[in-house]
Amino acid sequence: MLKATLHTHLQGDHDDYIGHTGFELLDYAKKLNFDVVAFSAHERVIITEDLKQYARSLDILLIPGIEINLGGHVLILNAHPETQYLKTLEDLRSYRLNHPEIFIIAAHPFFPQSSMCLQLNAHRYIDVFDGIEQSWFYTEWFNFNKKAESLAKQHNLPYIATSDVHILEMLHLDYVFIDAEKSIEAVFEAMRSKRFYSISYPKSLFQMIKIFAKMNLVNAKRYLPWSPPHFIFDHERISRHHQSQSQTKPKANYLSRGI
């Protein structure tokens, strides 16, 4: 069985200021005995040869991914860099026809933030998704995941626990054990076949307030003059066609083992 965390954020995220690097995330995941880690920064695929080699040295299967807003947040695992230029769910529906190697999860689809959650689009585009996310954010007395669980059951889709890591201690939260060999293809096949089980539990109100306070404290550090910059990454193997569509001029890749 492979212990897997499939929704994590790291330094260089487009939307949020994240305090830990990919190397630090991998180090902590190894400490917690994770076998599989998916990087899923907002609006950007963050993956470099150094990160891939470091994951291999830790015997961790590293899956490149992205959390992209297409009328609601969507996780694309085993994502190519050009996925950041998708704009709509129709684009994603067309894209996946030629990319069977990806795995698509509806992220926290029925949470109340309309700008970040799919809501009715989760139903309208259900054919696009390989799985539905079970968010870590719930208690015994309120749970926005209930509709997501119902949708997964209705369409016989995997219902997948994630911890949406923004600070390292969130790796202790929700995750999955997958009955598969340690390869991306085998992991996805097992997920689709529901050969996995989720580790998830209701949180206390105090626990959620504590986590959100720490997340916001880290995010506020972006405004301090001595904080590291919010890095922009060059992407590996990105086509000239998509480079020409970029709205910003690429900056240097600042990622190194030491930042």
Image (cartoon, grey):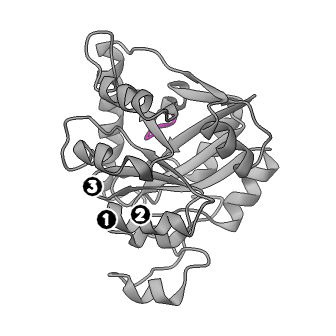
Q: Nearer the viewer, residue 7 or 19?
A: 7
**Residue 46 as seen in the image, left or right of residue 125:** right
Q: Which residue is mark 3?
A: 223
**Quadrant, the N terminus:** top right
Going 63% across and 51% down the picture, which residue do you hit?
A: 23
Q: Is residue 39 above or below residue 211?
A: below
**Residue 39 as seen in the image, left or right of residue 246:** right
Instruction: Provide residue 144's location: percent of width, then percent of height.
Output: 28, 26
Mark 1 is on which residue type?
Thr
**Image: magenta residue range:** 164-168
Mark 3 is on which residue type?
Tyr
Instruction: Provide residue 148's location: percent of width, then percent of height.
Output: 35, 31
Q: Residues within 10 Å of mark 3 (few under 14, many from 20)?
A: few
Instruction: Provide residue 39's location: percent of width, then percent of height.
Output: 55, 51
Label of residue 92 in the image: 2
**Residue 191 as seen in the image, left or right of residue 250:** right
Q: Is residue 228 above or below residue 28?
A: below
Q: Secondary structure at mark 2?
A: helix
Of helix, strand and loop, which mostly describes the magenta segment?
A: loop
Instruction: Provide residue 12's location: percent of width, then percent of height.
Output: 46, 60
